[in-house]
Amino acid sequence: MTPGTLNLTAQRNVPFLEAIRFVGLDFTGGTFALQVRLLPGTAGSALIGLTNQTAGTQGLSVAVTVESSINVSTLTIQIDEATIDALLPASTNGQKAGTDVVLYYDLVITGGGIGKTRWLEGSFTIAEGVTV
């Protein structure tokens, strides 16, 4: 399966919340992993690594509903403000202070009757803010 592209933008100085709907899939009991890195394929530890967590805490949570007899899994990505703010521009990637930080992520899901699959990928931009 070719992953879909979904570019995400987090705002500096506030938490990041993004809900993604998967229509026709039941991800109850699924395993989720999302990593943010400087560039795709960058070795070492991820800048941000998220896994299954309880809704309302940093990580990935899923809620499954039925709409018109069709399962809908809503995956929520939550990244706390402190985690976002810790990712500053780096001279190693040509980014300067006061500019948006452009990173990359992908989302891997095992569940819904489907084996381990990279479902989404794209840029993960941290937009600069003024109010702290």
Image (spheres, rainbow, N blue to C red):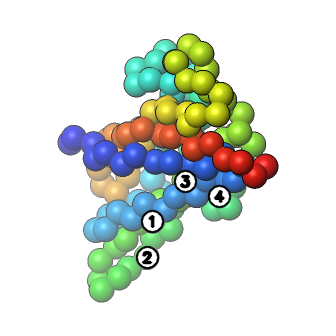
Return the residue at label 1: 74
Q: Tell me the distance, in whole angstroms, between the alpha carbons under discs 3 and 1.
A: 10 Å
Up the image or down, 85 lies above or below 59; here it is above
Tell me residue 89's x, y (percent).
Answer: 62, 26
Return the residue at label 2: 65
Tell me residue 86's x, y (percent).
Answer: 71, 34
Front residue of this view, candidates 102 and 53: 102
Mark 1: give few (<14), some (14-19) or many (20+) Cα within 10 Å: many
**Marks 1 and 2 in Cβ contact (< 8 Å):** yes
Up the image or down, 27 lies above or below 8; here it is below
Identified at 52% across, 58% down, the residue is: 18
Identify the secondary structure beneath mark 1.
strand
Name which of mark 1 and mark 2 comes first in the sequence. Answer: 2
Up the image or down, 92 lies above or below 47; here it is above
Identified at 45% across, 70% down, the residue is: 64
Name which of mark 3 and mark 4 comes first in the sequence. Answer: 4
**Marks 2 and 3 in Cβ contact (< 8 Å):** no
Which quarter of the figure has residue 66?
A: bottom left
Tell me residue 68's x, y (percent).
Answer: 30, 86
Residue type pointed to by label 1: Thr
Identified at 57% across, 41% down, the residue is: 126
Identified at 59% across, 16% down, the residue is: 91
Return the residue at label 4: 54
Mark 4: give few (<14), some (14-19) or many (20+) Cα within 10 Å: few
Identify the secondary structure beneath mark 3.
strand
Residue type pointed to by label 3: Ile
Q: Nearer the viewer, mark 2 or mark 3?
A: 3
Q: Which mark is residue 77?
A: 3
Residue type pointed to by label 2: Thr
The residue positioned farthest toward the bottom in the image shown: 68
Q: Tell me the distance, in whole angstroms, between the alpha carbons under discs 3 and 4.
A: 11 Å
